[in-house]
Amino acid sequence: MSDADAWHSLSALTPARIAQGRAGNGLPTRRVLEFQLAHALARDAVHAALDTQALAVALTPRSVRTLATRAKSRADYLAFPDHGRTLDPASRGALKPGAYDAALVIADGLSATAITRHGAALAVRIFEAVPDLAWAPVSIVTNGRVAVGDDVAAALGAELAVVMIGERPGLSAADSVGLYLTRRPQPGVTSDADRNCISNVRPGGLGLAEAARRLAWLMTQARHLGLTGVGLKEDMPEVLPDGTPAAC
């Protein structure tokens, strides 16, 4: 019985489950237990409730509002995806349009764990990376999916919607955050082809500072070119022509 095999050294290059070793015709007990733990963490991330009050406190002194979608429960959210894509009437009625360049929407998505661990720190990085825009108050949305950002930003009259959301957990990571950028969003109209996505944001994946830097570049280019989505290429240079770091 051994945890090593002929390509064991490759496991240092990826968190994927490769080179697991064998015990007879099966996996070593340690590997089976690791799998069961990862599966349990993924399930917990999906069903966990986001502590919106703690997140709001962590975002101080930013103005923050907490909103809800049409999903009345976590079970409703999981069974009927469309319910998480639009705000409930009370939440939409609480939003008033203003002269905003961008709106940051933080949603629990399919991993409240990801937002609990990284949401506040990532938001701070984003605001630091794009300090000159007129930001709307931060919207924290429970039982939200990506498209709810369209609903929020449109109600606020913001040019850009930035959605920070807990990504579907896998067996390698249960705390991955996704960032989605959409220009001039409209509820029920915008398709995924009109968005830009930065995925796997977490300390073990794409670092928070680098994710904020890439988002800042995309936001700058979106406003310059007047578009997001497939027409906006993620070709950020390391250094801008004047010698300053890109997106800073």
Image: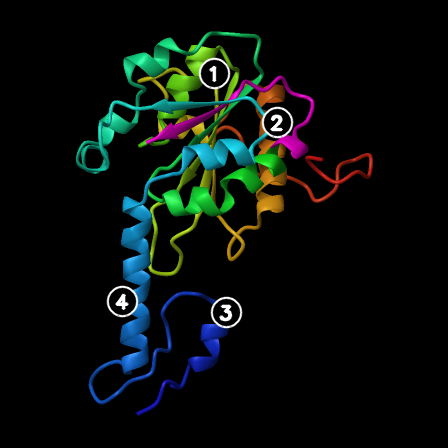
Q: Do the residues labelled 1 and 2 touch (CB within 8 Å)?
A: no
Determine contact: label 4, label 3, CB under 8 Å.
no
C-alpha separation, residue under disc 2 versus residue under disc 3:
40 Å
Whole-percent x, y for residue 173 in the image: 40, 56
Tell me where residue 59 sits by quadrant: top right
- Between the residue at mark 1 and the residue at mark 4, the CA separation in whole angstroms equals 43 Å
Mark 2 and mark 4: Cα distance apart in space: 41 Å
Q: Nearer the viewer, residue 81 or 64?
A: 64
**Residue at 22% across, 89% down:** 24
Q: Which mark is nearer the camera, 1 or 2?
A: 2
Cβ atoms at labels 1 and 4 below 8 Å apart = no
Q: Earlier in the sequence, mark 1 or mark 4?
A: 4
- Closer to the observer: label 4 or label 3? 4
How would you rate the neighbour count of disc 3 (Cα within 10 Å): few for under 14, some for 14-19, many for 20 or more?
few
- Nearest to the eye among marks 2 and 4: give it: 2
Q: What element carries label 4?
A: helix
Residue 162: x percent and y percent?
A: 49, 28
Q: What residue type is labelled 4?
A: Gln
Tag shown at residue 184: 1
Q: In the picture provided, is 245 more to the left or to the right than 91?
A: right
Residue that numbered label 4 is attached to: 36
Q: Name the residue under label 2.
A: 61
Start and end of the magenta stretch?
A: 127-142
Indicate the amino acid at tag 1: Arg
State yes or no: residue 19 in magenta: no
Question: On the rendered image, what quadrant is the N terminus found in?
Answer: bottom left
Label 2 vs 4, first from the N-terminus: 4
Q: How crowded is mark 4: few (under 14 residues within 10 Å), some or many (20 or more)?
A: few
Callout 2: helix, strand or loop?
loop
Q: Where is residue 234 in the image (x, y as percent from the top left)?
A: 56, 38
Q: Position of residue 40 (x, y in %)?
A: 28, 59
